[in-house]
Amino acid sequence: MKLPVLAASLLLASVGTFATQAGAQTTAASKPAGRPFVWENATVYFLLTDRFNNGDKANDHAYGRKDDAAKLRGFMGGDLAGITAKIKDGYFKELGVNAIWLTPPVEQIHASTDEGTGNSYGFHGYWARDFTAVDANLGTEKDFRTFVETAHANGIRVILDVVMNHTGPVTKMDPAWPSDWVRTKPKCTYKDVPTTVDCTLVDNLPDFLTNSNENVALPPQLVAKWKKEGRYEREVKELDAFFKRTGYPRAPRYYLVKWHADWVRKYGVDGFRADTVKHTEPGVWKELKQEASLAYEEWKRANPAKRLGNLPFFMTSEVYGYSIKHARSFDMGGGVKVDWLANGFDSMINFSMKSDAGQGYEKLFSDYSQALHGPMKGYSVLNYISSHDDGSPFDPARQRPLESANKLMLAPGSAQIYYGDETARMLNIEGAEGDAKLRSFMNWDELASNAQRGMHRVAEVREHWAKLGRFRAAHPAVGAGLHQMLASSPYTFKRTWEKDGVSDRVVVALDLPKDKALPIQVAGVFNDGQTVRDWYSGKTAVVKGGKVQFDAAAPVALIAQD
């Protein structure tokens, strides 16, 4: 949404008995064959396309955009080709990432705005001008198709950020949408449903009339644009077919539903991250889920060799301020509570993780497990420690990057790595204002030079995240399993998971000393006489007396049976 520890030692011991799950597809680098991907254990890499990697410098200045923006508020060159290049390089596989969430790639307003902090461009993707086109600063339709197909070929699913709430700001180059499409006032005060939904988030951010069932004509600027591009007749024909098939009125939200679902139908996008969810009517998302699911099944039937398994279409929800503690009842104010998971969503972004991470491991893990296996059973949360618009991240100075990794990657639920979490990218850039501070370009230079960050080197930080990520990707029990503490010193717990005849068991021990190896209890998980391997160091050991001990101390041990 666009709005103005300790380096704990750790040991993971695991064993899994797996059966092949129909439709499950894996990659050798990130997950052994037969171990299914489940969204409840997904490791999602969230990036702003323009801020990640510049793969094509020829598209850095589209639509006459200039380098006249305030600090970190203009386009910086990242593009779809840049993401694709990093997939091919194996960057995401090495991190154990199995889903990439990218901000909306749709064509943004062409001009800049002045938000009081200097000129700002729609580099972030949340200021749409045309929902049916790829923004030329990010690449072409071919680039987007290549990105999705490359991700799928590497076992990585794609989550597309979608906006149903608002257009981009109005500028001299970017006219307002018609008044039967949007409202331009009042500004939201967030006291109850009307002051959260029937209003604009900020000044000059027109709000779609998603509550309307009135027929509306296409905006004149889209008609003129499509005719100039030679695709007006095709777009109108597709819209006519959509409204005939569905019987929906030609109301604003149904145009948006169609346009968003087309990204699934055309490219095989696997899921949506829904933006500004609580600022629309709940039923809008259920309607979007229905159409996106139909489109996904259609794409999978047409592309059997390109699809990743047979899981249904996935949607996660950005309900600003939602906490896992809210479970399935979010208070909108005025006595109204909403169960967003009953309105098309499979998961909720958990805004409280970045503060909950200040707790001890057991409090954090047990509370999350109880929620996910209690009132939220059958659904999940997407945890994060930093994001593109949260001004209160966990460890903002990046002084505790290893603890950050331990808590995010080992917490029950799915994990969202915000680009640069794994490389300790700084979140407070001098000269930048507001959320721009959180959106610097990916610190590839610091990774290459192995820069110092606090007590650690950047390459060391990334390798720590990567080892946890690869282990997590191989074991659904880590994020999806039931948590139970086994011992307090050294702190040890287990996770157990079973679904459709497939089971996985994981044991984790934390706060081990750095100067000596300790025996870790694995009774009930590994049997005496079994040889296990430490994924962190590559060493092996034999279980004796229900315990395992390696011949060298290491800050982290990730143990599984080969």
Image (cartoon, rainbow, N blue to C red):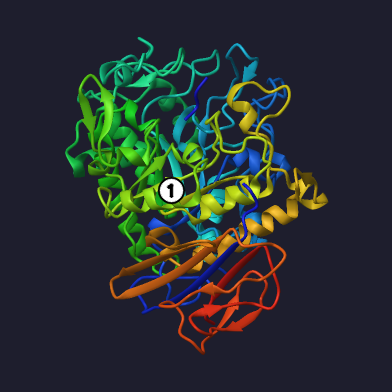
Q: Is residue 307 visible?
A: no
Q: Quadrant of the C terminus?
A: bottom right
Nearest the camera: 486 or 132?
Answer: 486
Nearest the camera: 361 or 119?
Answer: 361
Instruction: Report whether 96 appears left or right of 276.
Output: right
Nearest the camera: 347 or 218?
Answer: 347
Mark 1 burial class by Cα count in 10 Å: few <14, some 14-19, many 20+: few
Callout 1 secondary element: helix
Nearest the camera: 66 or 390?
Answer: 390
The residue lying at 32 percent from left, 20 percent from top is 196
User: Which residue is farthest bottom?
Assistant: 529
Q: Is residue 158 visible?
A: yes
Amino acid identity at mark 1: Lys
Q: Give above or below for 3 relative to 344.
A: above
Q: Give above or below for 532 relative to 357.
A: below
Tell me residue 277's x, y (percent): 35, 32
User: Which residue is farthest left?
Assistant: 247
The residue lying at 48 percent from left, 87 percent from top is 528
- Residue located beneath label 1 in the image: 363
Tell me residue 488's x, y (percent): 48, 59
Tell me residue 150's x, y (percent): 56, 60
